[in-house]
């Protein structure tokens, strides 16, 4: 009889190491299918639904809503569906098909390539076919992709899909039988496999070598195709790791459950030693707030930043928009117009559309890009996120407006992908919506510049030697002094300011 299959929380993209369990979509005892959503989790990037790679009966849920789970730790245990007394879907012999060919007995989502000891010869042949099918389908991919998890069908890493092979294929494969996996090997594979990474480990030799020398496969980054862990990766880990007396066995029956971490714990009975005041609550820093905090600390510690600013007369831009509205034309938002000016400015001053990379030996390089992914700060219920418009330099003001609105909505819904949230090359921040005039913003690491726009308000302004009331805003540019000096930063800021004051010069493609 099969053991429950333990599905580990997969890597949800961008190297994220943890996720908060928001809710379960299934319960213990439920029958589930392959790719059925089983839980909703929230990462530092977005909220996503996690589908199951296995079909069967849910035997255990490894976590409670509100807990923070580590990537690679147990999420759910699933028992394969039985097809007969003492047999399960993986151990059954193939049933005859209408054309007298045997169909594969490997169930959808099955991960066991070995046969039950003592089975009939036909079951043994089917087992060998299943083993080969397993390896082939690990490479083929189901095509079901979830933010950083899942597989590009037919192009690399894979989850298993239903096998449908004829007896002819079975006969061919039994001539050169594949190496059978022991229960212990299979368990090691199951617990170290991160979905979407070609099974992480395929070779029994590699798994056995890792087990005998105490190497944790879950900590290795494979050097093979699509992240496949090779023998050389284990040998390298053996050379650098301290000797381990005996690797600890990992029972399937009772996987370690992550410790509970409440969203907010009351501490009204405690007193703060510094202030002498009662502590009303302690709120863990996690999710988006944790990601923002980490990124801001890194930015402040690594980037020697400087800030320049200028007041700008935005009257002409405001009048242009009002004129377009009066003509019944669909008018882009102000942020889209400014985004159009920013992309033009970055083309002229490409030093601000770069990134600093530091090598292991301490040497640094300035990496330039052939294109602009313009990020913009968006406030959501989950915190501040920075989605980016990819290829922004190719878009008109209207196209920029449409993409900004789309990305803002998906970010607020928690459905933005890592590519949409982590691929920016320069950031535009409209903090004027909060009713403030200026801000010395922190650069969104690893970018090298961020432009802030304050509120647009009526101010006294000198026009042609006379005092007038004009629509004025403040632009603030914070930049990495390693990639450029004040002349470049000032030139870019002045370019954008001039475009706002004389918008028609750049908006022929509105």
Image (cartoon, helix red, strand yellow):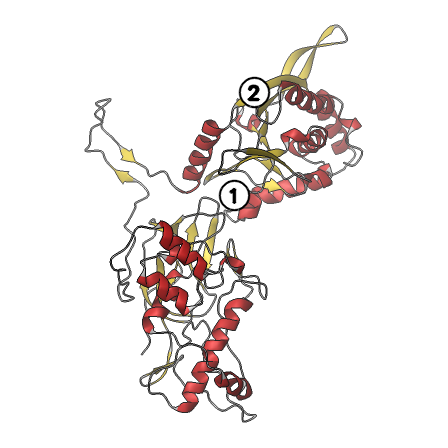
Indicate the position of residue 502 as horizontal and vertical percent values: 76, 23
Q: Is 200 displayed left or right of 99 in the figure?
A: left
Which residue is painted at 40% across and 68% down in the image?
205
Mark whose residue sits in front, 2 or 1: 2
Task: From the image, tell me which residue sits under label 1.
Answer: 412
Disc nearer the start of the sequence (2/1): 2
Toward the viewer: 115 or 153? 115
Which part of the image, by quadrant, shows the C terminus?
Answer: top right
Residue 439 at least partly seen: no
Q: Residues within 10 Å of mark 2 (few under 14, many from 20)?
A: many
Indicate the position of residue 263 as horizontal and vertical percent values: 33, 43
Q: Quadrant of residue 378?
A: top right
Residue 136 drawn above or below residue 394: below
The residue furthest front is 239
Q: Residues within 10 Å of mark 1 (few under 14, many from 20)?
A: some
Q: Quadrant of residue 270?
A: top left
Q: Quadrant of residue 7?
A: bottom left
Mark 2 lies on a secondary structure that is: strand
Q: Is 234 displayed left or right of 341 in the figure?
A: left
> Quick check: marks 2 and 1 in contact, CB under 8 Å?
no
Mark 1 lies on a secondary structure that is: helix
Which part of the image, by quadrant, shows the N terminus?
Answer: bottom left
Toward the viewer: 253 or 274? 253
Task: From the image, tell me which residue sits under label 2.
Answer: 307
Toward the viewer: 51 or 223? 223
Which residue is painted at 59% across and 18% down in the image?
308
Toward the viewer: 39 or 326? 39
């Amino acid at each position: 009889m099969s053991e429950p299959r333990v599905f580990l929380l997969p890597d949800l993209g961008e190297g994220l190491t943890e996720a908060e369990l928001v809710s379960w979509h299934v319960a213990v005892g439920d029958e589930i299918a392959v790719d059925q959503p089983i839980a909703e989790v929230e990462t530092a990037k977005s909220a996503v639904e996690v589908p199951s790679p296995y079909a069967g009966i849910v035997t255990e849920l490894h976590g409670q809503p509100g807990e923070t789970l580590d990537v690679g730790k147990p999420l759910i245990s699933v028992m394969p569906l039985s097809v007969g007394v003492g047999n399960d879907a993986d151990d059954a012999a193939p049933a005859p098909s209408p054309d007298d060919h045997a169909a594969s007995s490997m169930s959808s989502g099955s991960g066991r390539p070995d046969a039950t000891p003592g089975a009939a010869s036909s079951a043994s042949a089917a087992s060998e076919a299943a083993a080969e099918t397993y390896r082939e389908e690990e490479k083929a991919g189901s095509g079901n992709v979830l933010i950083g998890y899942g597989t590009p069908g037919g192009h690399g890493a894979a989850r298993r899909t239903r096998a449908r092979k004829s007896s002819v294929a079975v006969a061919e494969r039994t001539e050169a039988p594949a190496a059978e996996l022991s229960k212990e090997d299979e368990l090691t594979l199951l617990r170290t496999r991160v979905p979407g990474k070609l099974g992480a480990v395929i070779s029994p030799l590699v798994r056995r070598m890792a087990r005998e020398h105490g190497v944790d496969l879950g900590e290795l980054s494979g050097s093979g195709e699509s992240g496949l862990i090779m023998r050389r990766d284990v040998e390298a880990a053996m050379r650098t790791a301290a000797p381990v007396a005996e690797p600890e066995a990992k029972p399937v029956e009772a996987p370690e459950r992550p410790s509970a971490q409440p969203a907010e714990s009351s501490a009204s009975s405690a007193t703060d030693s510094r202030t002498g005041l009662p502590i009303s609550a302690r709120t863990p820093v996690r999710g988006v707030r944790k990601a923002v905090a980490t990124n801001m600390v890194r930015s402040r510690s690594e980037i020697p930043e400087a800030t320049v600013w200028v007041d700008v007369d935005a009257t002409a831009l405001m009048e242009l928009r009002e004129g377009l509205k009066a003509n019944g034309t669909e008018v882009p938002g102000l942020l889209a117009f400014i985004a159009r000016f920013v992309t033009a400015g970055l083309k002229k001053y490409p030093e601000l559309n770069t990134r600093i990379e530091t090598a292991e030996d301490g040497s640094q390089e300035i990496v330039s890009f052939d294109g602009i992914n313009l990020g913009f700060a968006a406030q959501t219920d989950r915190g501040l996120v920075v989605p980016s418009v990819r290829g922004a330099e190719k878009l008109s003001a209207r196209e920029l407006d449409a993409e900004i609105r789309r990305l803002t909505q998906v970010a607020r819904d928690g459905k933005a992908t890592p590519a949409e949230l982590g691929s920016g090359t320069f950031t535009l921040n409209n903090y004027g919506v909060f009713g403030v005039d200026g801000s010395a913003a922190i650069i969104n690491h690893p970018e090298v510049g961020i432009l802030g726009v304050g509120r647009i308000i009526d101010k006294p302004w000198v026009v042609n030697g006379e005092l007038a009331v004009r629509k004025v805003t403040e632009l603030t540019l914070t930049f990495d002094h390693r990639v450029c000096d004040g002349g470049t930063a000032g030139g870019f800021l002045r370019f954008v300011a001039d475009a706002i004051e004389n918008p028609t010069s750049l908006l022929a493609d509105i």
